[in-house]
Amino acid sequence: MRLRSPYDREIVRLALPALGALAAEPLYVLADTAIVGHLGRPQIAALGLAGTVLAGAFTIFNFLTYGTTAVVARASGAGRHEQTAELAAQALWIALAIGLALLAGCELLARPLLAGLGAHGRSGAFALLYFRIAALGLPAALVALAGQGYLRGVSDLRRPLEIVVAANVANLALEVAFVYGLGWGIAGSAAGTAAAQAGMGAAFVRELVRPAPPRRPSWREMRPMLRVGRQIFVRTAALYASFLVAASVLARMGDAEIGAHQIAYQLFLFLALALDAIAIAAQVLVGRLLGAGDAAGAYAAARRMLAWSVAVGALFAALLAPLAHVLPRVFASDPRVLEQAALLWPFLAAMQPLGGAVFALDGILLGASDTRYLMWSMLAASGLFVTLAILALAFGWGVVGVWAALDVLIGARLALLAPRFAGRRWAVVGWH
């Protein structure tokens, strides 16, 4: 990789605040876990169940961020400032509509949903209580996703970082006050989270209506975002389902296997933050340059960000490789879990540079609004992974078989995305 590029400064300017905002989400979850964890085993079990379902909603609906960024960045690059203001308003309407529908569904289906996932006894009662209160923050949280997408699209990544950090501080203060000060227990944790999300949502509403006075919903203006959003939704759901299948298969193999997987998976998610930050920079830069009619510049910037992401992934692999018998001990002490973690470790390390390339290509094609191809390539790779995971269970390949299949998943995505990037069919100029 060349040591310097005209795009390096802009990549850093975009990626660093993006990394800060991304890192805030795990800290949010850690704060909840630390506070609820001191209430007792039923309460922490309840948080683990209800929190996982709510986190899944944010993951599935992240198209509100990525889809909004893709469309707004193009309009911004084309200098269509009136259009970006219109898109901001329509993103707000879409997020509110989905958020309110999701809230209604969660409240109606909370009991059967949690029961179907295994909630029972005291922990089940606590899970239901937490879920119903915390779900009140869903509309505001989805508005925040749309707000982040809009601000990224206009290349303002500092303001989302400020809002998200403030929401984290408010969440911590409110939870301590509600849980311990008022003695509300796990209900206080849920109320604190919902209140902090409401404040965060209000801050992002202000950013979305700032470019122009509030406007009525417009199907014509919503269509580009909904088209892109639908395809990103399917792509994200397929990826999420792949990791759910991995956990389900390993849970059937044994406690040691699923325990080792949990350690490796959480490390994968943590390291992915840096790679995702570069992918966000790729999305913003590529969308902006294509909107401005500069296909050659978009390709040059994309190549640079691809090189950066692969280099960071390779660094992670080099750091992880010798720690197979060291780092897992931070998270577990059971000999069987540690043994299984050591077996899958080479596959976790090998995944990093592959993931670096895939994350960057994801961001590039998202910025280019080439989401149809992303959707179908993700479905194909997920289908291959699910087949291999089922074979791993049937033939007793253990944790090695499942993690080898996860490497194949990432490798298949790379094999499908790289030719698309090299062929430049994605580099279509203009704001639509």
Image (tube, grey):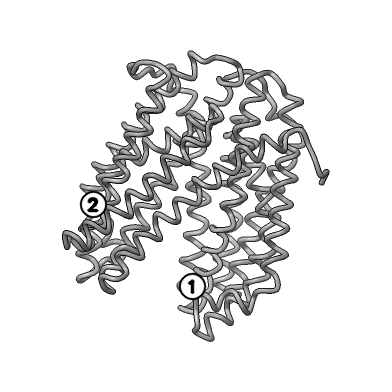
Q: Position of residue 312 (x, y in %)?
A: 69, 53
What amino acid is found at the position of numbered circle 2 in the picture?
A: Ala
**What crowding class fits label 2: few (fewer than 14 Cα within 10 Å), some (14-19), or many (20 or more)?**
many
* Helix, strand or loop for disc 2: helix
Q: Position of residue 269 (x, y in %)?
A: 54, 58
Q: Is residue 88 left or right of residue 374?
A: left
Q: Is residue 373 in view from this perspective?
A: no
Q: Quadrant of residue 76?
A: top right
Q: Image point 69% across, 48% down: which residue?
A: 309
Q: Quadrant of residue 80?
A: top right
Q: Image point 58% across, 15% down: which residue?
A: 79
Count the numbered circles shown: 2
* Helix, strand or loop for disc 1: helix
Question: CA separation, marks 1 and 2?
Answer: 32 Å
Q: Is residue 227 above or below residue 176?
A: above
What amino acid is found at the position of numbered circle 1 in the picture?
A: Ile
Among numbered discs 1 and 2, the one appearing first in the sequence: 2
Q: Which residue is mark 1?
A: 258
Q: Image point 67% across, 42% down: which residue?
A: 361
Q: Is residue 180 left or right of residue 298?
A: left
Q: Image point 47% across, 47% down: which residue?
A: 237
Residue 191, numbered label: 2
Q: Quadrant of residue 406?
A: bottom right
Residue 245, numbered label: none
